[in-house]
Image (cartoon, helix red, strand yellow):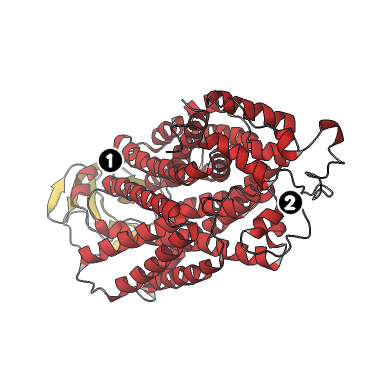
């Protein structure tokens, strides 16, 4: 097996765990049917025209949150049990469902009785996150996405400073430890805090792994390799659906989901650093060792020499005129470097808008798919599965048409689909569902390729930071999406209108971006600027670690392999 294939499969496997943790709360925070608990032992139960001796038997007939259950206790008291209140009837002799007499209202001070037909336990039933505490249950996913947002920026920047490998070690180990810790949290607040940390490391890994695989494969394989990381993420969503169907206790469910991380944690220490990052940090000897290892694995008889490519003598690095012409004082890069001149700033704003639109559209279309009905586990499985063909289409389009030329039509087509959804009569439910799935497919293609496109538009020294900041905008979109869906109370098609406008605007602005198909990864600001303009690069230049020719030769190591590039 070739070197790049081993490295790729090992690192991309962990993306399954990212998909798992992102969607785990779908079943973990389920709110089942419930009513107030009564202060005593129940002897008889009435629900409409049905009677029983157990409250559990009433759940099969439960139809609405406005329903109530009438129970008679062993001491003769008769209670009406609602979801967030309970009433004791003054007349304890008339045990009927309908009652117009006097009754006393009480709060649910004794807790709640939950329907355990589907789930034995969720965080809602564990900590009674219902009624006046319902907002706490709804807050679990937004707080997770906030952690994802921060993790994308923090770990993207750290990966540019410390290296890709160390961040992958840290975040993958963190996913396993925090994932297991979530299952053993003792209250709601500790649960949210640990999940927040889990979100940060999950997002950090997902950001860095895209950069890692991008820098390790050749030009021919870069498109498919980066895109298939999304496929691993989608597999994680399908794993959540399967595990939710098999395991109905939330903390056991969480443990089983977290165990999928373990194989990678045990072998992640063997992953090497990328030559691109080592060269950008002037660690030429370490880069040469890795290049030699790649050459041996791929049976390349004459591996490239880093010192020859850069014309650098180890004892005269500072005075070298080829690799040190652009070297100024080494600079610590931050997000402001993505706005260092008008051309780069315009590129960054457009990329950020595409990230935001892709995430917003993805989640709006996903939330709209609840109209599918049927088995909820099967629905989630299909929602994950429908992403797979969109990535295949994205890969083919990116390789045949180019990154920009694929991005533009799918962004605009998603806007057109949003317009069509607003024109479809509400009676045509199947057609509406198909249109929503088509919209998700279109936005999924755009959302899938933006990771790779972003990585190719920026030089090595800020590549992780660029992808991380884009992922930050992606998370902002995912935070806004639920509120966007709530706007259906204003107008039923308001979410589609907003997504359509954003998608059309993003598609138009994408015309200004340069095409990167078939071009080597840039290593300096000058190279990155030349993708779209011949004007000067950023004034605060980073050290020019590697020429474009050197970059091409290192990528040729990947192209000379036999399996991964085809």
Q: In which quarter of the image is residue 85?
A: bottom left
Which label sits in the foreground, 1 or 2? 2
**Residue 269 visible in the shown view:** no
191 displayed left or right of 156: left
419 displayed left or right of 53: right
Q: Where is residue 307 in the image (x, y as percent from the top left)?
A: 74, 34
Residue 41 shows which numbered tag?
1
96 displayed left or right of 345: left
Q: Position of residue 151 (x, y in %)?
A: 60, 47
Residue 167 or 304: which is nearer the viewer? 304
Residue 539 or 309: which is nearer the viewer? 309
Compared with 557, 56 (above or below) is: below
Q: In which quarter of the image is residue 476?
A: bottom right
Q: How many labels does the image show?
A: 2
**Residue 27 visible in the shown view:** yes
- Give the residue at x 78% y 60%: 539
Residue 18 shows which numbered tag?
none
* Disc 2 secondary structure class: loop
Crowding at dot 1, Cα within 10 Å, few <14 / some 14-19 / many 20+, comes out as: few
- Give the residue at x 56% y 38%: 556
- Give the residue at x 22% y 57%: 63
Residue 465 or 176: which is nearer the viewer? 465
Q: Residue furthest front?
A: 302
Circles 1 and 2, Cβ within 8 Å, touching? The answer is no
* Disc 1 secondary structure class: loop
Pointer 1 or 2: first along the chain? 1
Compared with 412, 139 (above or below) is: above
State how far apart marks 1 and 2 are (Cα): 67 Å
Q: Position of residue 177 (x, y in %)?
A: 54, 32
Crowding at dot 2, Cα within 10 Å, few <14 / some 14-19 / many 20+, comes out as: some
What residue did someone put label 2 on?
A: 333
343 displayed left or right of 59: right
């Amino acid at each position: 097996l070739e070197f790049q294939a081993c490295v790729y499969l090992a690192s991309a496997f962990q993306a399954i765990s990212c998909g798992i943790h992102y969607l785990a709360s779908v079943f973990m925070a389920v709110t089942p049917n419930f009513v107030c608990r009564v202060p005593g032992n129940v002897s008889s139960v009435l629900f409409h025209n049905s009677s029983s001796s157990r409250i559990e038997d009433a759940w099969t007939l439960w139809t609405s949150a406005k329903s109530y259950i009438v129970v008679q206790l062993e001491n003769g008291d008769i209670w009406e049990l609602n979801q967030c209140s309970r009433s004791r009837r003054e007349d304890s002799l008339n045990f009927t469902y309908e009652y117009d007499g006097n009754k006393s209202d009480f709060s649910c001070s004794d807790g709640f009785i939950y329907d355990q037909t589907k789930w034995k336990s969720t965080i809602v039933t564990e900590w009674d996150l219902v009624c006046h505490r319902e907002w706490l249950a709804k807050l679990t996913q937004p707080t997770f996405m906030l952690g994802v947002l921060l993790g994308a920026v923090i770990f993207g920047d750290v990966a540019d400073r410390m290296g890709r490998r160390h961040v992958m070690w840290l975040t993958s180990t963190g996913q396993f430890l925090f994932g297991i810790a979530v299952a053993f949290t003792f209250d709601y607040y500790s649960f949210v805090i640990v999940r927040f940390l889990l979100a940060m490391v999950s997002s950090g890994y997902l950001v860095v792994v895209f950069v890692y695989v991008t820098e390790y494969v050749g030009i021919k394989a870069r498109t498919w390799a980066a895109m298939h990381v999304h496929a691993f993420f989608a597999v994680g969503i399908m794993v959540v659906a399967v595990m939710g169907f098999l395991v109905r206790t939330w903390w056991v469910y969480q443990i089983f989901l977290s165990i999928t991380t373990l194989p990678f944690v045990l072998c992640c220490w063997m992953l090497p650093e990328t030559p691109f990052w080592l060269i950008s940090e002037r660690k030429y000897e370490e880069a040469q060792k890795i290049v030699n290892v790649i050459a041996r694995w791929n049976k390349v008889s004459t591996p490239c020499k880093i010192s020859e490519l850069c014309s650098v003598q180890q004892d005269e690095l500072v005075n070298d005129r080829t690799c040190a012409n652009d070297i100024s004082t080494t600079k610590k890069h931050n997000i402001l470097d993505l706005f260092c001149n008008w051309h780069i700033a315009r590129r960054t704003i457009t990329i950020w808008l595409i990230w935001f639109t892709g995430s917003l559209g993805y989640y709006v279309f996903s939330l709209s798919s609840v109209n599918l009905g049927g088995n909820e586990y099967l629905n989630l499985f299909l929602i994950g599965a429908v992403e797979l063909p969109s990535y295949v289409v994205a890969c083919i389009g990116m390789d045949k048409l180019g990154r920009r030329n694929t991005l533009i039509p799918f962004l605009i087509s998603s806007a057109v689909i949003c317009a069509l959804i607003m024109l479809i009569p509400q009676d045509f439910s199947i057609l509406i569902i198909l249109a929503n799935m088509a919209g998700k497919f279109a936005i999924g293609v755009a959302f899938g390729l933006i990771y790779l496109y972003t990585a190719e538009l920026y030089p090595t020294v800020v590549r992780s930071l660029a992808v991380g900041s884009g992922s930050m905008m992606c998370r902002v979109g995912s935070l806004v999406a639920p509120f966007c869906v709530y706007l259906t109370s204003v107008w039923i098609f308001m979410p589609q209108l907003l997504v359509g406008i954003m998608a059309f605007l993003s598609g138009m602005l994408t015309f200004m971006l340069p095409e990167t198909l078939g071009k080597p990864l840039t290593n300096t600001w000058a190279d990155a600027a030349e993708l779209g303009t011949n004007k000067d690069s950023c004034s605060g230049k980073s050290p020019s670690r590697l020429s474009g020719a050197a970059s091409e030769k290192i990528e040729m190591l990947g192209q000379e392999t036999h399996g991964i590039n085809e």
